[in-house]
Image: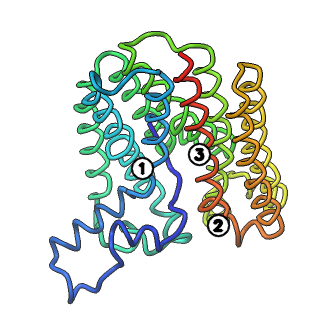
């Protein structure tokens, strides 16, 4: 249920995959396993897992009778579908990564030949198997996430070729689809309530702005290969302002909706989170290329905290 955001920093990735070691210190099998894990990008699994959890919380249902489904859904959202999308993207972006990130597993030769594609296909099949255990709604959501994952990166569709379509697909898969799936799994396929739909759609929109932050480090490769990301289309400064607006405005709407739904304390909490994000965004706008990943690293926790506050408040009132 997720597509293609890059990790906020290599230091965080090293915590999960370990720093790159020389062949003299690692066996070939261990090298291959490390490269495969790096291809699947564990650090990117968190957002869809979190969004699925928000869907679970917003349902207002207890975990006692649904814990196994909730756990399977979290696994499907992160280590399965999100990981699949990362492998797919790395395979079809191998020529772009040769410019932007030559140390990635495929352009560096640590995953030679077609092994990147084989891993993407294997993880697709595993994702289908896990989704089949989640009932009709979970299976349908898993299939939708996989379709988006392939459409995002694979020619001739390649949604990421268009900056607006790319970030919209990412936001939808990361937040909206995962959120609504968590709700459906916990309620045995009941139609989501209006507040749940509003939260899922608005946070999907905000997440599209977060996705745009990843494009600031890839301008050279994107230009060389015709990928029309927002920084390529509008330049770094204008793209930075667009990303800021896309992130902030949906959260303002969520805050106002929470007030109208009679949840003033949650709205006040969001106001505080928005103030902190705004300060970071003003700092980011002055040097967007250099500071995009820092905003992603420090701003995203504030964004997702607002998601859970909103989900908990709606679930508690259901």
Label 2: state its secondary structure. Answer: helix
Q: Give the labeled residue for mark 2.
A: 294
**Residue 146: percent from the left, percent from the top?**
40, 34
Name above or below for residue 182 compared with residue 158. Answer: above
Pick the quarter of the image with the N terminus. top left
Category of crowding for the residue at label 3, using alpha-carbon neighbours closer than 10 angstroms: few (below 14), some (14–19), many (at least 20): some
Q: Residue at x 61, y 53 (%)?
A: 300
**Residue 167: percent from the left, percent from the top?**
63, 43
Numbered badge on residue 171? none
Label 3: state its secondary structure. Answer: helix
Disc 1 to disc 2, C-alpha distance: 19 Å
150 or 66: nearer the viewer: 66
Q: Residue at x 76, y 66 (%)?
A: 288
Q: Give the labeled residue for mark 1.
A: 45
Q: Give the labeled residue for mark 3.
A: 305
271 or 101: nearer the viewer: 271
């Amino acid at each position: 249920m997720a597509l293609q955001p890059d990790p906020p920093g290599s230091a965080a990735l090293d915590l999960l995959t370990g720093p790159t070691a020389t062949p003299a210190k690692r066996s070939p099998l261990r090298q291959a396993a490390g490269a495969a894990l790096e291809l699947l990008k564990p650090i990117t699994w968190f957002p869809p897992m979190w969004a699925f959890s928000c869907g679970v919380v917003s349902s207002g249902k207890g975990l006692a009778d649904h814990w196994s489904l909730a756990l399977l859904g979290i696994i499907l959202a992160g280590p399965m579908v999100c990981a699949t999308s990362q492998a797919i993207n790395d395979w079809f972006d191998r020529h772009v990564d040769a410019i932007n990130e030559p140390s990635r597993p495929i352009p560096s030769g640590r995953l030679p030949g077609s092994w990147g594609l084989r891993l993407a296909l294997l993880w697709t099949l595993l994702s289908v198997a896990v989704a089949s255990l989640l009932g009709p709604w979970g299976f349908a959501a898993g299939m939708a996430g996989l379709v988006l994952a392939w459409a995002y990166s694979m020619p001739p569709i390649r949604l990421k070729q268009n900056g607006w379509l790319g970030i919209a697909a990412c936001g939808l898969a990361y937040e909206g689809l995962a959120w609504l799936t968590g709700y459906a799994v916990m309620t045995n396929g009941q139609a989501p309530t209006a507040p749940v739909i509003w939260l899922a759609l608005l946070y999907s929109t905000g997440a599209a702005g977060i996705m745009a932050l990843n494009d600031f480090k890839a301008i050279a490769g994107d230009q060389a290969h015709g990928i029309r990301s927002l920084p390529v289309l509008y330049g770094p400064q204008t793209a930075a302002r667009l990303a800021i607006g896309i992130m902030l405005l949906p959260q303002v709407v969520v805050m106002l909706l929470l007030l109208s739904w009679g949840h003033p304390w949650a709205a006040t909490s969001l106001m505080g989170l928005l103030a902190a994000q705004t300060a970071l965004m003003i700092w980011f706008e002055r040097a967007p290329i250099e500071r995009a990943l820092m905003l992603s690293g420090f701003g995203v926790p504030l964004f997702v905290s607002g998601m859970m506050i909103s989900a908990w408040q709606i679930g508690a009132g259901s």
